[in-house]
Image (cartoon, grey):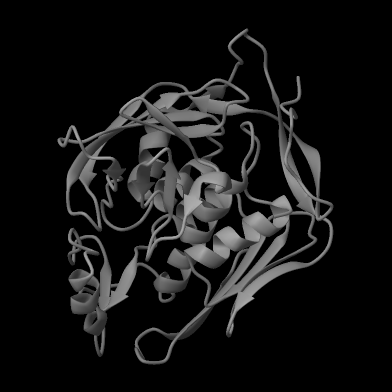
């Protein structure tokens, strides 16, 4: 059975079989931690999902699909919003699930405020995706079945022609390729310890992701911290969940010399996972090239591929 019902697509991509069946978690996972921007604690429970239903958040019995259709512009993170309920900072979790091949998953969120409609409650942990990768490894995967017990073939969108979105000197683009590859560049000339960096992947599979991308932590520039906190951001930020750059790094050592650039690739994978439909692959099969991108441009590329 192919989960190909009512695909939204465009002439820019062709959907093809990956040769695999859709998967889900073999069991439930529960993790508790503090969110980066709100600083509040919450419990997140990842549960097996039915084939063809994809990944979605369950917050106070409100279901919010992990789909580009529900992305809302927000500073420094990716936010999903439906019927007034928001889930923020989803990119690290979704990045790990996409890379691990968790195609279908119910993500339950619990926090202490019974009236709160804004659930910026995805734990930041150490600022990377390592905790989520290890959690998935802990329970493993199984072939997903539909509610009536059938399997679904996993499809992937192959990019047919060059596609790009840009703003000023920043861009995110996708070129036809036989495999998923990513080349990402950043430039922080105001922070010489970061400077200009490029990171390229030969291809993106779960093993490469686990060893070379998932460990990369979020980063910030020390001089910008006060400004961010003044507008209500990074209330839960600390030297334990981000690498902070001043003239040098305040909390070395780095896990990679180009750790900031690798973290941008981690974010990109999480944001492009929102292109997924009906439990199929979110990452388009393409060579994705980005320079000075961010969550808004990442989402912009997904919308472009969707034909919006």
| Residue at 18 percent of width and 58 percent of height | 236
Is residue 202 visible in the rendered structure shown here? Answer: no
Comparing 222 with 239, the one in front is 222
| Residue at 62 percent of width and 47 percent of height | 275
Picture coordinates of residue 158, whole percent (x, y) = 78, 50
Q: Which image quadrant: the N terminus?
A: top right
Q: Which image quadrant: the C terminus?
A: bottom right
Picture coordinates of residue 136, whole percent (x, y) = 42, 35
Picture layout, residue 193 above or below residue 264:
below
Res. 98 image quadrant: top right
Comparing 265 with 51, the one in front is 51
Is residue 126 visible in the rendered structure shown here? Answer: yes
Res. 42 image quadrant: top left
Res. 192 image quadrant: bottom left
* Residue sticking out furthest to the front: 83
Picture coordinates of residue 263, whole percent (x, y) = 43, 65
Picture layout, residue 280 above or below residue 176:
above
| 136 left or right, relative to 109 | right
- Count of residue discs: 0
Picture coordinates of residue 113, whole percent (x, y) = 16, 37
| Residue at 74 percent of width and 53 percent of height | 307
Comparing 100 with 3, the one in front is 3
| Residue at 31 percent of width and 45 percent of height | 122
Picture layout, residue 51 above or below residue 192:
above
| 222 left or right, relative to 142 | left
């Amino acid at each position: 059975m192919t989960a190909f019902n009512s695909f939204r697509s465009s002439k820019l991509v062709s959907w093809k079989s990956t040769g695999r069946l859709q998967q889900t978690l073999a069991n439930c996972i529960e993790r508790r931690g503090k969110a980066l921007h709100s600083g509040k604690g919450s419990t997140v429970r990842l549960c097996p999902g039915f084939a063809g239903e994809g990944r979605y958040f369950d917050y106070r019995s409100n279901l919010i699909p992990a789909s580009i259709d529900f992305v809302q512009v927000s500073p420094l993170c990716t936010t999903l919003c439906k019927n007034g309920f928001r889930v923020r900072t989803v990119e690290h979790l979704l990045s790990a699930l996409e890379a691990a091949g968790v195609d279908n998953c119910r993500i339950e969120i619990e926090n202490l405020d019974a009236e709160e409609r804004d659930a910026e409650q995805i734990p930041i942990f150490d600022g990377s995706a390592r905790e989520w990768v290890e959690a998935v490894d802990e329970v493993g995967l199984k072939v997903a079945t539909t509610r009536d017990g059938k399997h679904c073939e996993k499809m992937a969108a192959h990019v047919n022609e060059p596609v790009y979105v840009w703003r000023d000197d920043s861009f995110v683009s996708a070129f036809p390729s036989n495999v998923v590859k990513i080349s990402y560049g950043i430039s922080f000339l105001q922070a010489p310890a970061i400077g200009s960096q490029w990171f390229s992947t030969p291809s993106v599979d779960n093993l490469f992701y686990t060893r070379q991308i998932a460990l990369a932590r979020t980063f910030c520039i020390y001089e910008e911290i006060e400004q961010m906190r003044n507008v209500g951001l990074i209330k839960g930020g600390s030297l334990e969940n981000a690498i902070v750059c001043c003239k040098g790094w305040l909390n070395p050592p780095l896990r990679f010399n180009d750790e900031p650039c690798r973290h941008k690739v981690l974010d990109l994978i999480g944001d492009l996972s929102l292109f997924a439909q009906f439990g199929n692959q979110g990452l388009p099969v393409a060579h994705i090239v980005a320079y000075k991108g961010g969550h808004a441009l990442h989402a912009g590329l997904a919308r472009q591929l969707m034909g919006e």
